[in-house]
């Protein structure tokens, strides 16, 4: 699954990471509300691990198995607002999505706008059959975004041996198309 070169919405650009994005990536990873709601360990939040993750994202874009991670930018000035992307799961074509914004850009509809574009690309271009997201139960903003983009709450499940159980949301291509054309 190859990341697109550029996706645009009315206010946003979604594009692959570039070297100059590291400082903003680092700020996002350091944001307490981001890290505590994403099941990250303190070890994963060290500068060395963050630099390694960032480098692996950049290096993967030209590999046979790229990491589908995109920067969410302001369309007017290219400011880094956050990140979104997709990750293939091991079960029959299901893909996991993710999204996060820097605190100062939350509550503006940017996550919804970015994720609607990502769903459009996923279902109409790459023809992914199903997209899911696992959300920490305390991350109210994230599950409200999932609902607003048409994902259905499936239930609380055990995921990757993480406590507490995570909330699982899902949307299938046919559900997306019904919503889009109504």
Image (cartoon, helix red, strand yellow):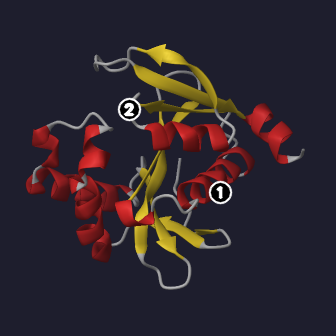
SS type, badge 1: helix
Q: Which mark is residue 117?
A: 1
- Name the image quarter holding residue 169: top right
At a point 85% along the width and 37% down the height, the residue shown is 178
Query: Which residue is at the front of the view, 109 or 97?
Result: 109
At a point 38% along the width and 66% down the height, the residue shown is 104
**Relative image position of residue 133 (x, y in whole percent):** 50, 33
Q: Is residue 180 left or right of residue 110?
A: right
- Give the class, few, some or many, for how many residues have Cα within 10 Å of label 1's Cα (few <14, many ≥20): some
| Cβ atoms at labels 1 and 2 below 8 Å apart | no
- Name the image quarter holding residue 137: top left
- Give the class, few, some or many, for how many residues have Cα within 10 Å of label 2's Cα (few <14, many ≥20): some
Q: Inspect this view and state whether residue 102 appears.
A: no
Q: Inspect this view and state whether residue 2 appears.
A: yes
In the image, residue 126 sits, relative to residue 113, either above or below, namely above
**Relative image position of residue 86 (x, y in whole percent):** 49, 45
At a point 46% along the width and 38% down the height, the residue shown is 140
Report which residue position mark 2 lands on: 138
Q: Is residue 109 left or right of residue 121?
A: left
**Relative image position of residue 69 (x, y in whole percent):** 43, 54
Q: Is residue 47 left or right of residue 106?
A: left
At a point 28% along the width and 18% down the height, the residue shown is 163
**Relative image position of residue 27 (x, y in whole percent):** 24, 63
SS type, badge 2: loop
């Amino acid at each position: 699954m190859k990341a697109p070169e550029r996706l645009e919405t009315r206010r946003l650009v979604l594009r692959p990471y570039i070297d100059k994005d590291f400082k903003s990536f680092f700020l996002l990873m350091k944001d307490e509300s981001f890290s505590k709601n994403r099941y990250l360990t303190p070890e994963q939040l060290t500068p060395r691990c963050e630099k390694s993750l960032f480098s692996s994202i950049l290096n993967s874009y030209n590999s046979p198995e790229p990491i589908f991670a995109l920067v969410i930018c302001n369309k007017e000035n290219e400011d880094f607002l956050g990140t979104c992307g997709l990750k293939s799961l091991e079960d029959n074509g299901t893909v996991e999505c993710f999204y996060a914004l820097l605190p100062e850009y939350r509550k503006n509809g940017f996550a919804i706008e970015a994720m609607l574009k990502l769903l459009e690309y996923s279902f109409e271009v790459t023809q992914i059959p199903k997209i899911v997201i696992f959300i920490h139960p305390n991350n109210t903003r994230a599950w409200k975004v999932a609902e607003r983009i048409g994902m259905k709450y499936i239930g609380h499940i055990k995921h990757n041996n993480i406590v507490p159980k995570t909330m699982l949301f899902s949307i299938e291509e046919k559900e997306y198309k019904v919503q889009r054309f109504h």
